[in-house]
C-alpha cells in the first residue's frame, strides 16, 4: 500500500496514544501540530540516508557567471533539489569517482557550488524532488515508519505533555531509522576498495582549508 500524508499523520498520532485524524482538514490540535512538523520531518529524513527511491544522477556543467578568485578552476551549480551527495565523477558512468584519495582532481562543495578542476561533472545525489525523494508512493514501509515515529516524537510534548512517552518515542524513532538505513544499504551493490571515513577525513581536511569563493 502506498504511503500518504494522511497515513503518516494518523500513525504518528497513534504513537502518541491519541485518536488519529480522519482527514487533513480536521480542525484539532493534533492535525495542526502535524502540519507544523511534517515538512521538517521529511527534510530531516532525506538528509539521514541514501534512499534508493530518492537517488538521482545528473550532469552538472560549469557556471560561466562565476569566476573563482583562486583555487579550483570551475564552479558548478548544485541542483535545486540537492540534499546529500552520493558520488561525484568526471565520467558519466560514475567510475572512477572524484575522491580525494583516489584522484588528484579533488572537489569541494561550498557556498551552493561544487568546485572542481574538471568539467562537466556527473553527480549522484539524494533528491528532494516530488518525483524522487518526496514521492510518498515510492517510500518503503521502513522509511514510512521512521517518518511516523519522528513526527510523533516532535508533536508529543505539546499534544500530551508526557515525558515518559517521549522517552519511548526516542527509542522507537532511532530503531526505525536504523532499520530503514539497513534495508536501503542492502539495495545498493557492494562496493570494494573504497577507503574508510578516517582516511577520507585526513585527505579532505587538507583541501577544506582553501577558500574557493568567487571574487
Image (cartoon, grey):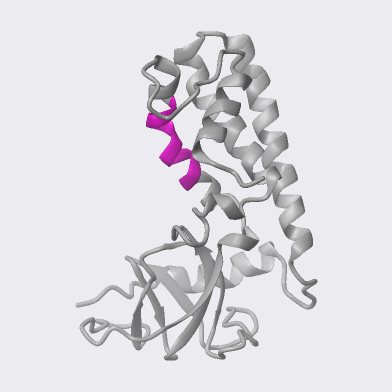
Indicate the position of residue 94 as horizontal and vertical percent values: 61, 84
Q: Is residue 84 visible?
A: no
From the viewer's perspective, tell me whether residue 205 is left or right of residue 51.
left
**Stretch of the chain drawn in magenta:** 34-43
Q: Position of residue 186 (x, y in %)?
A: 79, 60
Q: Position of residue 138 (x, y in %)?
A: 60, 55
**Would you identify the image quadrant in which residue 118 lies?**
bottom left
Considering only vertical position in the picture, is 162 above or below 9? Answer: above
Q: Main secondary structure of the magenta part?
A: helix
Residue at the image point whose x is 55% and y is 34% from the top = 8
Residue 128 position (above or below residue 4):
below
Q: Residue at x 55, y 46 (%)?
A: 45
Observer-nearest residue: 117 or 27?
27
Q: Is residue 5 visible?
A: yes
At horizontal 36% and vertical 18% (from top left) the residue drawn is 27
- The quarter of the picture where residue 196 lies is bottom right
Q: Nearer the viewer, residue 70 or 65?
A: 65
Q: Is residue 101 above or below residue 48?
A: below
Question: Where's residue 162, x and y in %?
Answer: 56, 8
Is 43 drawn above or below residue 192 in the view shown? above
**How many numbered dots are placed on residues in this image?**
0
Q: Is residue 14 magenta?
A: no
Using residue 1 as the reference point, say whether residue 210 is left or right of it: left
Amino acid at each position: 500500500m502506498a504511503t500518504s500524508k494522511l497515513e503518516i499523520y494518523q500513525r504518528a498520532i497513534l504513537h502518541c496514544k491519541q485518536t488519529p485524524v480522519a482527514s487533513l482538514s480536521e480542525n484539532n490540535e493534533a492535525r495542526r501540530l502535524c502540519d507544523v512538523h511534517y515538512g521538517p520531518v521529511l527534510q530531516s529524513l532525506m538528509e539521514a540516508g541514501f534512499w534508493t527511491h530518492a537517488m538521482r544522477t545528473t550532469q552538472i556543467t560549469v557556471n560561466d557567471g562565476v569566476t573563482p578568485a583562486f583555487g579550483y578552476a570551475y564552479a558548478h551549480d548544485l541542483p535545486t533539489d540537492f540534499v546529500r551527495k552520493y558520488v561525484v565523477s568526471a565520467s558519466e558512468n560514475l567510475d572512477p569517482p572524484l575522491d580525494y584519495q583516489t584522484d588528484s582532481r579533488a572537489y569541494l562543495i561550498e557556498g551552493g557550488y561544487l568546485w572542481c578542476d574538471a568539467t562537466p561533472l556527473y553527480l549522484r545525489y539524494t533528491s528532494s524532488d516530488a518525483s524522487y525523494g518526496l514521492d510518498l508512493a515510492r517510500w518503503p514501509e521502513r522509511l514510512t515508519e521512521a517518518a511516523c515515529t519522528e513526527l510523533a516524537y516532535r508533536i508529543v510534548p505539546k499534544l500530551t505533555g508526557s515525558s515518559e512517552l517521549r522517552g519511548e518515542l526516542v527509542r522507537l524513532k532511532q530503531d526505525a531509522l536504523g532499520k530503514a538505513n539497513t534495508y536501503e544499504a542492502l539495495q545498493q551493490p557492494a562496493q570494494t576498495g573504497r577507503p574508510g571515513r578516517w582516511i577520507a577525513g585526513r585527505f579532505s581536511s587538507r583541501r577544506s582549508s582553501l577558500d574557493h569563493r568567487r571574487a
